[in-house]
Each structure stands twice: as C-alpha cells, then as structure tokens.
Amino acid sequence: MQFDNLNVVETFGRNSRVTFPYRAINKLRAIPPEERSVEGKLTYVYHLFPNAIVATFPTFMAMVVLEPLAIDRTNIITYALTKDADGPVAGHSAGQRPSEFVDAGAVEDRAMACAVQRGLASGANEFLEFGRFEGAIGHFHRTLRGALAGAGAT
C-alpha cells in the first residue's frame, strides 16, 4: 500500500515526475545505505507535456494518452506494459492482472475528474486552489498557460 499523504514532485522542463512511496520503503531503514534499493517500493508517475502520462509500478507500467475532443470531452487511451505474461500484480489480489489494476484506477480517476469538471462547469467557484500534494498539476497549468501565450504570439 502507498502512503495517503506523501509524494515528491520534480519538474524537468515542461514535464514532471511524481514519486509515490509504498509503505514497504520503511523496511530500508534497517538496511545499510550502500545496500538499499527502492525497486518495488515506489511508483513514479511521469507527465510528459502536454498529454501523456507514464506510471511505473513494481511489476508493470501504464501509459495514458489524453486526447482533447472538445472543451468538455476527452478521449482516453490506456496501455499496460508488463515484463511478464499478464499475470497477477504483486501486492494485489491473486487474480488481479495489470490491465485490471489499471482499469480500476482509471475508473476512480475518471469519476474524480468528471466531478471536478461538473463543479467547474457550474460556475459556482471563482477560483480553484490545488492542494499541498498537487504541485505537478500547478506546474502543468503554468506550462500550458505559457505554451498557449506563446502560440498566440506567433
């Protein structure tokens, strides 16, 4: 399981990487620094500007491409890549395959995104403030604003 309130946000150019540690990372405290490895103890989520997301998991990777269709519609394309055959995902139920894990996460993310879009469309809020753990989203919006301003200048 991952921590609910812990991540590290790093930016590189227009892109960002968010690191989410699993609770198993605590086991590294008892291991000498030169012997430590974070393999299997972190999930990295890379946002490649403007519309691709690559998430690494201990046993597989997922890539999501967001294709805007209109102001209120987006086509979502998801790819799941694994080193092994489409077998169980470590740390999840025995029958859960990478594609099922990605699908379950996508359902949760999609529901949240739709709720946010409905809230924005209502016009009820003049401002939107991102939370403490949403630094990558702020970076995306600043970068997008800059890219759009640059496109308008040419």
Image (cartoon, rainbow, N blue to C red):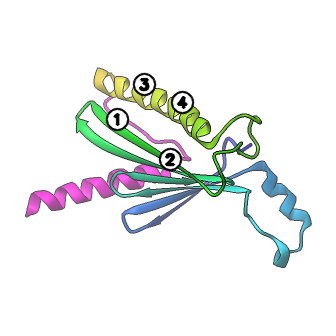
Please state which of residues 150 and 57 is positioned toward the viewer in this rendering.
57
What is the residue that sits farthest to the right in this orientation? 30
Residue bearing the label numbered 1: 127
Residue bearing the label numbered 4: 108
Q: Check disc 1 and give the amino acid type.
A: Phe
For the record, the magenta segment spans 125-154
The quadrant in which residue 93 appears is top right
Q: Position of residue 91 (x, y in %)?
A: 76, 43
Let me know if residue 121 is in the magenta part: no
Q: Can residue 123 be seen in this view?
A: no
Q: In this view, does 119 lie to the left or right of 56?
A: left
The Cα atoms of the two marked residues, 2 and 4, are separated by: 17 Å
Residue 141 lies, with reference to residue 154, above or below; the image says above
Circle nearer the N terminus (3, 2): 3
Residue bearing the label numbered 2: 134
Q: Check disc 2 and give the amino acid type.
A: Glu
**Do callouts 4 and 3 mark residues in contact (Cβ within 8 Å)?**
no
Q: Residue at horizontal 74%, vertical 56%? A: 41
The Cα atoms of the two marked residues, 1 and 3, are separated by: 16 Å
Residue bearing the label numbered 3: 115
Question: Is the residue marked by circle 3 packed among few (<14), some (14-19), or many (20+) residues within 10 Å?
Answer: few
Q: Where is residue 25 in the image (x, y as percent from the top left)?
A: 79, 57
Label 4, secondary structure: give it: helix
The Cα atoms of the two marked residues, 1 and 4, are separated by: 24 Å
